[in-house]
Amino acid sequence: MGTTLLIDWTRCEGRGLCAELLPEVLTTDDWGYPLSIREDRSLEVPPRARRYAEEAIRECPRLALRLLDS
Amino acid sequence: MTGLITPVRGLLGARARTYREHLDTVGPLPAVGAEQLVQLVAAAGLTGRGGAGFPSARKLAAVGSRRSPVVVANGAEGEPASSKDRALLIHTPHLVLDGLVLAARAVGCRTAYVYAPESVLDSSIRPALTQRRDRLTITPVPSADTFISGQETAVVAAVQGLRPVPTSTPPPIYVKGVKGRATLVHNVETLAQVALIARYGATWFRERGTDDDPGTRLLTLSGAVARPNVYEVAGGTTLGEAISAAGGALEPIQAVLVGGYHGGWVPWTAHAAQCPLTRTGLSAYEAHPGAGILVALPARRCGLKAAAGLATYLAGQNAGQCGPCRNGLPALAGHLQDLVQRRSPAHNHEEILRLVGTVDGRGACHHPTGTTRMIRTALRTFRNEVELHVAGACTELQGSRKGA
């Protein structure tokens, strides 16, 4: 069981809000687009960061984020 | 399975210009039930021939369980180094259409499409359709002449009359595709194989190939080989056997691009020549057979220059939709060109490695991932060339040949 952040790359414009709200998972690349902080580039959201992930989803101006529970 | 018809020997043995000639060659289309067809294809172990290599029976079953699905024969073949789909559609259009009819029947679909370049539709598919009476509406849809036009979600977009660029998943197209309906997109070679399997059976299919890679597959061989062309080989054929099938190397070669522009550069060594052209056989080289594309690179050429040329082309073929791809691929191509020109080579080499690590896997489709794979394998296979460039030299410059 894990929770993963899904990014709709066709919507994302690299505004960068998600990386500010969710530093447990995200940083930004050279152009400001969200990038996993992990070596394996996984976008798994640890349970303690879930509420921040939900906030990032709400605040994304492009509605480009979703959570996938598996 | 068959009456008086002797099974043909593979796809290229089934050439026919007219429907009459086609039936004389391969026999009538048998009345195979939906479940029976899925079982036959599963028993044959057929995998997709468009590049991803997914088990075909599982795709059929996934779409077949849904309401009013749509089936598309995908012959877009955006890969510049591939011509097997075009060859198949020109020489055996009815075999592909038979496969489409069977797949449609298997999933309970009444709306089917053939997605291929306009020139192929015009010269082969439209004339073929006028010769047949299928209880199925088959609509030809012209494909765009772009690298990514054959990507599944781009195919779904094109069939709906939208710009043929990939869309974001999930949901996958087998859940929600053309007009929101479950959609099955099969490569035309896959469908042609289905048409033969339905006629001659799974055991016939497995007479050639290996357990790991049953049946035959089409390869497009080009570059420094004696006879560049489309060849049909048994599954499990090694890289060396494939090069031999095309008459062998024309001159000393150093590497083979396996799997096309999204594939991997494999060094031409005794070990590599013995590797079967399968996912497992090529895993040591991070390569995969893809759509069966092989390009042989002469030893006198600079491998980095060849890779930079491909990277520049692929960067230009990005759909402009996803930030990591839109920004990352042109940057990567630029650093590669700088490395080729020996401008700050050590710095550019490091930047390429860093960007490959950040672009990989980030996009709506596999375009960034496939492109970074090609670049990563190039840096590994041509590492001597990287060292030459860092030292201010290049294989293609006089007096700086490798080992000289």
Image (cartoon, coloured by chain):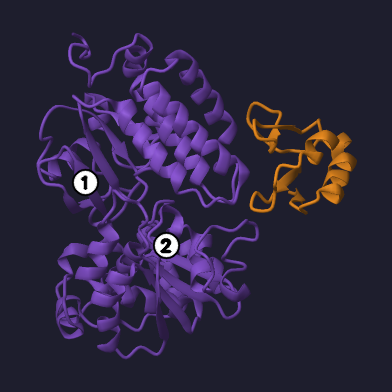
For label 2, count other residues whose C-alpha is less than 10 Å away and answer few (under 14), some (14-19) or many (20+): some
Query: Mark 1 against mark 2, which lies toward the viewer?
Result: 1
Residue B230 in percent (x, y) is at 20, 54
Q: In which quarter of the image is the N terminus of chain B?
A: bottom left
Residue B221 badge: 1
Q: Chain A is drawn in which colour?
A: orange
Left or right of residue B344, residue B402 in this image = left
In the picture, which chain is purple? B
The answer for which chain carries disc 2 is B
Q: Which of B247 and B310 is in front in this view?
A: B310
Q: Quadrant of residue B175?
A: bottom right
At label 1, the amino acid type is Leu
Q: Residue at 22%, 77% (x, y): give it.
A: B2
Are marks 1 and 2 in one subunit?
A: yes
Residue B17 badge: none
At label 2, the amino acid type is Ala
